Amino acid sequence: MTRARVMAWCTAVSLLAAGCGTAQPAGSAGGDTFSFAVKGDPGLLDPAQVRNTNTYTALSLAYDTLIHVTPKGKVVSGLARTWDVHPSSVTFALRRDVTCADGSRVTPDTVAENVRHVTDPATKSPTLGVTVPQGLKATTDKAANTVTLSTPKPFGFILESTRFMFMVCGKGLQDRSVLAHGTSGSGPFQLTSAKPNQRYTFAQRKHYAWGPDGKGTDDPRTPGRVVLQVVPSEQTAANMMISNQLNGAMLNGPDRARMQKIPGVKTSEQSIGPSEFFFHQGQGHPGHDPALRSALLQAVDLRQLGAIASSGTGRKATGLVQNPRPCPGDTVSGNLPAFDRAAAEKALNAAGWHRSASGARTKDGKRLSIRMVYGASSGEAATAAAEYLGKAWQDVGVDVHLRGVVDAAYAEVESVTQDWDVIWEPLGVTLPTQLLGMLSGPFTPDGSNFAHLTNKHYEDQTKRAGNQPGTAGCKLWRASEVSLLRSADIVPVVDRTAVVAARNSTFQLTSGLFEPTSIHLTGGPR
């Protein structure tokens, strides 16, 4: 599984949804249930083996992290009370009152053991190099109750990267096999029942008091249970919301419009990150020539393509990292070729690709042909976008072959067989550092650079940015994005949006993670 596909399951939303309406069936105070729809089965709930967004959503209920990040991007406390950040290390002072679900204490050794497990090559953790920096090490000071995480060289967002590092504790730390059917964390909820492909039920832990900024579960509106219901169909999820079978759901297809008109259901529309495509730049691929990449982009109306890809619900693409961005700003405007079909024709001629009598473009007797891959499981909008892109290139004489690939086979095609020239691949990253392995470094299969990019400006700017902690390097991180765009190394088409619907409840979900102490029931008899 490549790092590109790993981050595809991180394409979750930064959301704040609230709603109230007709009463949902409920029991006595503290025994009420909050029910939320997830689109797929979470699978193995081992934080070291996360492979999809649904897993992250489930883990966020039962496990804690060292820090949290609010929907507005502010870093607040979690297991750690305070932290001291340096370019290649961060020292966390932990709370002393944190207990695991089995009653054992969470200590600096707990954090260190989690780090050792994820970074152990034998673990083969898909999170290593994406949400967990390569070479990460942990050292502890038991007397001071601190743990220091460090990397061999400076790592720009070493603090912020820990928001996805869920800490296993207690029995699960000693025997990971218990995570096959349960959870072993210090979070506010504990898994009590798992019915794969149906529902996962979590029970509230009493006296939990170490959530974001010290929030706990003492609010009487906190549900006694949280149920994640596996509902692959958005149409079904919408129907369940209407009939009071769900308190919350996220929709990005046509049923989102229906949700926005239902009395008693409140909705919030939020960005869920850019949708983008890549040219394969390996030897023998058309995209190896930067002049050809630029010419092909001139032949495409990216604004119209974005409208099609998002079914008219997207926003103008402004960057490569999803909200809340640590480095805000528009890096896209003015840095991709403008739509001009006549200019595209001239540029293709200048690159040596001339039309034959049949209208096809050839160079040295070879036909200009492009194999484009897109997600067949992504719905009608994805297919329509691929067809529009293919037609735009066919109109300037390119032979285009479209291929829809289901999710289960996408990683194989993308990184193993590599039989593509253009691929639609939303990365969905939350930090610019998460792009590094995918957009630079060793090519697949030796690394995660699936499009075989070699942008020296990008590599230099990110190296310099990494020497500065957090947002201090934002000017360079933004410049690195511009370098990629001007070389047509990555083409952000549109910022996708989703609608979060809430009924009889309020809750927060940031980058796919619940802030569990924010889940409150607001309607019905208490």
Image: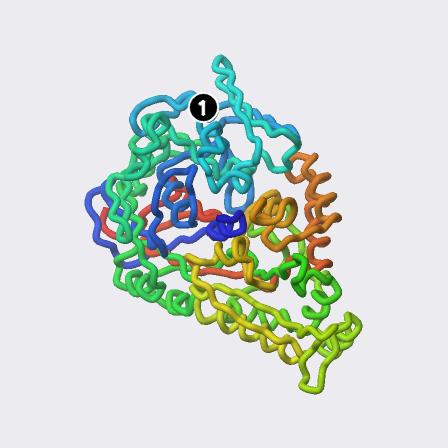
Residue drawn at (50%, 32%) of the image: 119
Residue 147 visible? The answer is yes
Left or right, 493 with reference to 49: right
Left or right, 463 with reference to 267: right
In this rendered view, identify the residue nearer to me: 430 or 500: 430
Look at the numbered disc 1 and give the secondary structure of its residue: loop
Residue 326 visible? The answer is no
Query: Is disc 1 surrounded by few (<14), some (14 to 19) or many (20+) residues within 10 Å?
Result: many
351, above or below 448, in the image: below
User: In this view, which residue lies farthest toward the left?
Assistant: 27
Q: Which residue is mark 1?
A: 95
Left or right, 304 with reference to 45: right
In this rendered view, identify the residue nearer to me: 415 or 182: 415
User: In this view, which residue lies farthest toward the bottom?
Assistant: 357
User: In this view, which residue lies farthest toward the right?
Assistant: 350
What is the x, y in percent for residue 358? 67, 86
301, above or below 424, in the image: below
In this rendered view, identify the residue nearer to me: 193 or 387: 387
What is the x, y in percent for residue 365? 71, 75
